[in-house]
Amino acid sequence: MALVLTEMTQQIGTLTMNNPQKRNCLSHALIEDFFAALDTFERSKMRVIILRASAGSKVWSAGHDVHELPRPGRDPLPYNSPFEQLLRRVQDYPDPVIAMIEGGVWGGACDLVLTCDIVIGCETATFAMTPAKIGIPYNPSGMIHFINVLGLNKAKEMFFTAAPMNASEALNLGILNHLVESDKLESFTRGLAEKIVGNSPLAIRALKEEFRLLSKGHPMDAETYEKIGAIRRCVYDSKDYCEGILAFHEKRRPQFKGE
Ligand code: YXS
């Protein structure tokens, strides 16, 4: 079964995540299909991409596949992991990528949404950033995505509480560009995509790359980089990291001890 469905009409490529049984979690297999779809869109000169789940989904994506998180003592979000490669592929994709959201967006899927260029959601859209719930030291490039969009205080609250944020909060905080009624979500998103298709592709590609380079965050000295590495290692070497993943497998709340 294809874990991703694709459609190409009027220079707009639509990618639909299609693994509802596993709540569209970003497994290596789904990411592989994701890459293939983006490659097809690029070869076919699609000018705008829409990322979505199937109509009526209660969960847009449950985030990183927890079963594929590495064992303790390994960085859970290494630079070359399929998940991190997916985020960079979307953020570096030459043309605009629109995330069309209905249902819950969890963990790393929130980061995927923030690497898109425009986010349009309906009233069922929620966003929960879950590293603290599972015991994961999120990575710096991912955290910059949240700081850039939400600002420091709201990004901290989203990470510290791991609580789902509703669609109107997401609109107020700038995660959503637009909040529309669910029965208008597809037509509104398509209409916005068509507006972009009507503009200069070269100018838009240059603008997208300029925005990406300007928003990459502040240069970091070597010592700061090393200090962040040490801080993160203390977490993914911890017993709490094991407990967080075990609790997920056992479908229970984790009992963190701070060890
Ligand atoms: O038990 P079966 O085999 O039917 O599978 C179940 C779940 O195990 C599976 N599933 C997942 N498998 C791997 N990774 C996931 N993230 C994941 N989420 C779900 O899908 C099947 C149906 O799940 P179920 O019964 O819980 O569905 P539900 O409709 O009752 O609840 C939907 C959710 C999304 C509320 C619930 O599945 C859930 O809370 N999922 C975990 C969401 C989450 O914490 N994601 C963060 C993953 S870690 C991550 O993204 C980053 C590393 S971080 O944490 O740093 O941001």
Image (cartoon, rainbow, N blue to C red):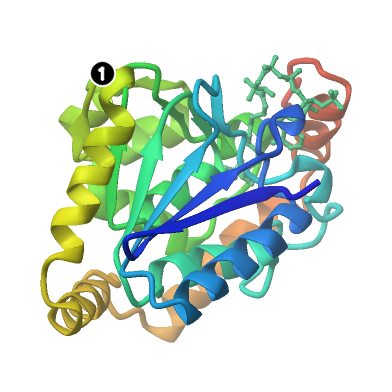
Quadrant into which the C terminus falls? top right
Q: Is residue 29 above or below residue 81?
A: above
Q: Kindly tell me whether residue 151 is visible in this rendering.
A: no
Q: Kindly tell me whether residue 80 is visible in this rendering.
A: yes
Q: Is residue 165 above or below residue 70?
A: above
Report x, y in % for residue 257. 73, 27
Q: Residue at x 82, y 55 (%)?
A: 70
Q: Is residue 26 above or below residue 159?
A: below
Quadrant for ligand 1?
top right
How many labels sit on residues?
A: 1
Report x, y in % for residue 255. 76, 20
Q: Is residue 162 above or below residue 197?
A: above
Q: Residue furthest front?
A: 10
Q: Residue at x 22, y 24 (%)?
A: 180
Report x, y in % for residue 148. 25, 55
Which residue in the structure is indicated by mark 1?
181
Report x, y in % for residue 15. 51, 52
State left or right for residue 237 relative to residue 151.
Answer: right
In what element is the residue under mark 1? Answer: loop
Quadrant of the image occupied by residue 141: bottom left
Around disc 1, counting alpha carbons within 10 Å, would you say few (fewer than 14), some (14 to 19), or many (20 or more)? few
State left or right for residue 53 relative to residue 92.
Answer: right
Which amino acid, by three-letter code, is at mark 1? Glu
State left or right for residue 215 relative to residue 94.
Answer: left
In the foreground, 142 or 197: 197
In the foreground, 216 or 226: 216
Asked whether mark 1 lies closer than 8 Å to ligand 1, one says: no
Q: Residue at x 40, y 67 (%)?
A: 91
Q: Residue at x 71, y 53 (%)?
A: 30
